[in-house]
Every structure is written in structure tokens, then in C-alpha cells.
Image (cartoon, rainbow, N blue to C red):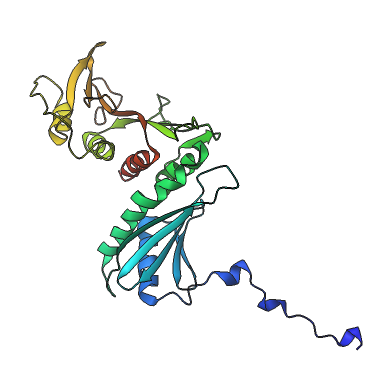
Amino acid sequence: MNSDSTPARDDSSAPTSTHLYSTSQVPAHLLALAADTADTLGPEWEVTGLLSTAMLTHPLGFRVSLDTQADTLRISAFVTTSHNPAKLPEAISHTMSMPRRGADSKDSAALASVIHTKVLPHYGRLDAIAALRLLSLPLRDAKIPAIAQGSTDHAEINLRANDGGNPVLTIVITFPHRDGVHVGLLLDRLNTRQAIRCARPALPAQLPGDTDPTLGFAPEVHTVLDAIPGLHAAFSQSGPRFTIVRTPTDDLKIRHDARAIDPDAPLTLAIPETSVATAYAVLRAYAAQ
């Protein structure tokens, strides 16, 4: 047979990444839940699908799968947690009751909460750059113009005010290899409401002991003490300008400056060392102000 008569191969049937992902087989109620959840998660999340699985994706590389089986919704992700190429990505999976058809916004909010607290923090475990990518997400969504830089061992995020003073936001991420990623945070120029909201995710549900009913502190200090029982306050050793509110273990401090640049925002929240998951929760609270 003449080679010219050989039928040409139709490459349009070959699988491509464009053809691979489609929402055409995703059940309608799951697709609707995924779309509402994407809107709740943030402005850059998108919905795609693979067979009957709905997938939530973000440009920074986050990918979360949603599957249903009977009345159960499974939320899963495959996360790289090791630089060893021989080690497979870790499977992260959680389940919740599948919302009924036509469910309201509370269901997408509940699903988004599971993704924020149980899934996404795993994406920051690989090294300092992975944590930097995750921790930048709330700031990116809120269009907070912070500056990020670093390496796999050490990374930082900084935000300065227009008046040229000290940074109003400092995040230091270290990866000592032996025991995972550590994060330190310093949030400056907070009002009372902001300081309380940002401190709560870093604290246990109940701190040991009661707050001493000490008088003589600024009203903002008393408001913090009333809102978070178990914290203790004392004037700084440098003088009465600063009041330090702290946990019994000193793993969180809120400083009040009686001569703050912004009298309406005299508080600074300092967390010397915490996990990626806690830092992410604190920054989500900070970005929500």
C-alpha cells in the first residue's frame, strides 16, 4: 500500500491536560457546593473536576478534592512533605456529612473551615518556602502589600507603614530540618478588637488560672484581660510606658504602648514560636480586620 494512502492519526483523541479536567461528570449538588466553597475560600480559588470528583485549585499550587459516597463528603489532598523524591506525597483526608441539596451558605462555610484548618496547613510543612507560600495567602487575598523573601531554611514576610516606622507586621519562618517548620509573628499597631481576635487562634480554649484583678492599667489592657481569662499583666521593667500582657508560659505576649504612634492602635501581639497551622490561623484573623 502506498504510504500516502495510510490514514492519518487523529491526535484530537489523545488526552491532554485541558481535556483531562472537566466538571461534566461531577454531580450537580457537589459542583454547586464546590463553587460556593471556592467563593468562601477566597477570590483566586477555582473549581474543576476529574470524573465525578470536584477539585478546588489555587494558583499558588493548593489543590483539594471533594468526593461523595452516600451521605458522606470526603475532603482530601496529596501534599509533598519531603524533599526525598522516593517518598510519595502524603494523603490528607477528612470527612463530614454531605449537605443536602439546595443547602445554604452555612454548609460552604463549614467546608471552607475544614479546608482552612485541617487541609491547607499541611501544604506549609515541607520547608520555609512552602510555609511562606501558605502564610502569604491571607495577606494576598486581603491585598496587604507585604514583602516576602527567603530560602528553604529561612524566610520572612514584612510590612511597613507609610510613616517609615518599625514594621507593622513581621513573620519569621525557620526550618531547622530536625523538628519541622517554626514560625514567629509580631503584629504591631493593633486596636483592642484586633489584638483579641488575632490572639485567640494561638491560645488554648482555656488558660490555667484566673486573671489577677489588678487596677491601674490602661483601659485597653483591662479589655484584653477581661476578654481572655488566664492572661496576666505587669508594667515593663523599662518603665510604666509599656504594659505586658502574657500567658503563664510566655508563649504569647500583648504589649501596650502608652505613647503609641497611633493612639487608637496601641497594642502589639508577639508570638515567639508556633506551628504553621497556628500562624496561618492568626494571619487569617489579621487579614480579616
Tell me if residue 177 can be seen. yes
**Residue drawn 37% across the image and 37% down it:** 275
Q: Position of residue 213 (x, y in %)?
A: 7, 24
Seen in the picture, residue 26 relative to 254 is either above or below; the reply is below
Corner quadrant of residue 253: top left
Residue 194: x, y in percent? 26, 38
- The residue sitting at 45% across, 73% down in the picture is 52
**Drawn side of residue 173 relative to residue 205, left or right:** right
Q: Position of residue 81 (x, y in %)?
A: 50, 45
Q: Is residue 184 left or right of residue 148?
A: left
Taking the spot 53% from the left edge, 43% from the top edge, the residue there is 82
* Relative height, residue 261 to residue 206 (above, below): above
Extreme-front residue of the structure? 86
Q: Quarter holding the N terminus?
A: bottom right
Q: How many marks?
A: 0
Task: Give the vertical position of 105 relative to 276 (above or below).
Answer: below
Residue sitting at x 32%, y 40%: 282
Q: Position of residue 19 (x, y in %)?
A: 59, 72
Front in this rendered view, residue 232 or 235: 232
Q: Is residue 169 visible?
A: no
Out of 81 and 56, give the one closest to the viewer. Answer: 81
In the rendered image, the quadrant that contains the C terminus is top left
